[in-house]
Amino acid sequence: MYEFLKRVHPAASQDFSVGGRIAWAIHCYDAAWDAWEKGDLATAVITLREGVYAFPFPKSLELLGECLLQEGNIVEATIYLAAAVGMSEEVEFHTLFLLGKALAAANDNYVSKIMLEKAILIEPDAEARELLRLIISRSKTEERVA
């Protein structure tokens, strides 16, 4: 859709207010959600990338990050999840937890701990607490080795 817009009206392809971009992003999110629920991560990721390109709203960024995390693309997942946190007016537990989880998988104990602590303040979740405990333990082990 936007390749055509680039050819016929290049300036409009760089304008988020152009009619249809937001609607397309919402459509992509809905289609990706359906694919994700069916376990079709590949389709969900492709569709979410298209939607984020059209208009990057926090829920699309979060779901793309979650899908990438499930696929094992940890660094890329971290980028999208951090963007979701940064763009959210009110950050939710799930987004912070996913970002903390991605950072933990990427061995960033310091920032992972911060995100998990923020998530737990919102919702005292058992899985988040267990991951935080693991991160703290891992940090202490690394400090002793260094």
Image (cartoon, rainbow, N blue to C red):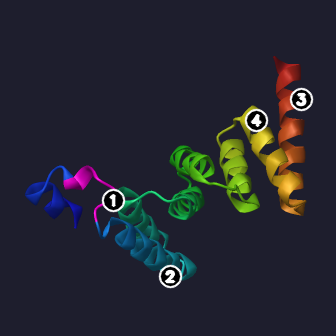
| Helix, strand or loop for disc 1 | loop
Give the magenta-colored segment's residue range: 12-18
Distance CA(mark 1)–CA(mark 2): 27 Å
The tag on residue 109 is: 4
The residue labelled by disc 3 is: 140
Q: Nearer the viewer, mark 2 or mark 3?
A: 2
- Is residue 107 shown left or right of residue 70? right
Could you tell me if the residues under marks 2 and 3 are in contact, i.e. CB atoms within 8 Å? no
Q: Amino acid at mark 2?
A: Asp
The residue labelled by disc 1 is: 17
| Helix, strand or loop for disc 4 | helix
Q: Amino acid at mark 3?
A: Lys
Q: Residue at x 55, y 43 (%)?
A: 75
Q: Amino acid at mark 1?
A: Ser
Which quadrant, please, contains the N terminus? bottom left
| Helix, strand or loop for disc 2 | helix
Q: In the image, residue 84 lies at what x, y percent?
A: 58, 53
Q: Nearer the viewer, mark 1 or mark 4?
A: 1
Q: Amino acid at mark 4?
A: Asn
Q: Is residue 64 above or below residue 38?
A: above
Mark 4 surroundings within 10 Å by alpha-carbon count, few (fewer than 14), some (14 through 19), many (20 or more) = many
Distance CA(mark 2)–CA(mark 4): 33 Å
Q: Nearer the viewer, residue 6 or 108?
A: 6
43 in magenta? no
Within the image, what quadrant is residue 106 found in? Answer: top right
Q: Earlier in the sequence, mark 4 or mark 3?
A: 4
The residue labelled by disc 2 is: 34
Q: In the image, residue 56 lies at what x, y percent?
A: 45, 57
Distance CA(mark 1)–CA(mark 3): 49 Å
